[in-house]
Each structure stands twice: as C-alpha cells, then as structure tokens.
Image (cartoon, rainbow, N blue to C red):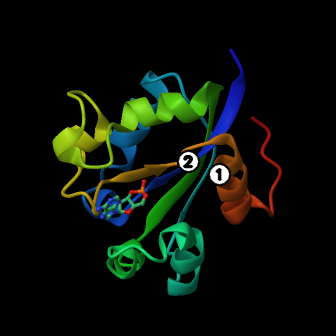
Amino acid sequence: MAVERTLSIIKPDATRRNLTGEINARLEKGGLRIVAQKRIRMTRQMAEKFYEVHAERAFYDDLCTFMTSGPVVVQVLEGDNAIARNREVMGATNPANAAAGTIRRDFAESIEANSCHGSDAPETAEREIAFFFSEIEIVG
Ligand code: CMP
C-alpha cells in the first residue's frame, strides 16, 4: 500500500465545541499520523481561494462565511492510503448519510458545518497541503 499525505481541516463548528482532541483521536485510531498541524483563522480571501472549485455552487458564499467564522485546525495526515482512509474516518459530506462511528455522523451539525474537510484525490492533496504548509518542511 502507498504511503500518502492528505490535507485535513477541523472546521469552526468543531473548534467552537472543543472537539479538536476527540477528532484527532479518531484520526489517529484510524491509522493516520498527524505530521503537521496549526490552528489559524482563515481570511475571506483564503477561504474563497481554497474553495474556488466550488465558486459556481449555490453554497459557496455561505461556505466561505462559515469557514471564516472561527478558528480552524489545518493538518497534514500521513499513512497508507491516507486520502481514502481519512474520507472513511470522516464519513459522507452530509452527516445524514454518514456511516455510524464516523466523525461527521457523530459530530457534524449540518452539511455545511460538517466538522472536517479532507482532500479528495492525490492532486488535490498536493495543492491543498501546499496552500497551508508551503513555508515549512514536514518531517513525518
Ligand atoms: P468539504 O469537504 O469541506 O468540501 C466542500 C464543503 O462545502 C463541504 O465540505 C461542506 O462543508 C460544504 N457544503 C455546503 N453545502 C454543500 C452541499 N450541498 N454539497 C456539498 N458540500 C456542501
């Protein structure tokens, strides 16, 4: 199996409820190593750029407002098949469709305030990791 890296974001709804530790425990129990992590406040410009692939979607404006409504924890996760593994641990985007025992099923408030983000493909992971962590070397 290939060792991969993926970009994870613990979203404002989760940091507001002090769920960072619980979410990190789920990630680690799921076989993912947190090799970089920082708590930041995204600016509007950052949110619009990060989610630019969704710019034409009806939810884009609200999503950018939500992502700047409080601190987020941005992380690089590493492990075998980390991208797919993280998506399994997170569960479906809409918590109503997320499997039992997943982060979103247990913690998400709505399809928008869904507690976490994870890259969806290797090219996206590369772009998203560079977006937040270009300035440091990740030692793993
Ligand atoms: P995320 O994995 O960060 O990718 C895009 C985000 O848009 C998604 O999680 C949700 O937080 C948000 N979102 C809001 N409404 C929708 C929707 N109808 N479909 C998909 N994503 C949505």
Query: In the rendered view, would you say 79 is above or below 5?
Result: above
Residue type highlighted by circle 1: Thr
The quarter in which the C terminus is drawn is top right
Q: Which residue is mark 1?
A: 124
Instruction: Measure the C-alpha gap from mark 2 to mark 1.
Output: 6 Å
Provide the secondary structure element on which disc 2 rests. loop
Circle 1 — which element?
helix
Q: Quadrant of ligand 1?
A: bottom left
Q: In the depicted view, which residue is nearer to us: 45 or 70?
A: 45
What residue is pinned by disc 2?
A: 119
Q: Is residue 14 left or right of residue 122?
A: left
Q: Is mark 1 within 8 Å of ligand 1?
A: no
Seen at 39% across and 31% down, the residue is 89
Which quadrant of the view contains residue 87?
top left
* Labelled pair 2, 1 in contact (Cβ < 8 Å): yes
Between 22 and 64, the one lying in front of the other is 64
Question: Which residue lies at the image location 50% right of the left edge and 85% below the top edge?
Answer: 44
Where is residue 106 drawn, in percent x and y? 20, 39
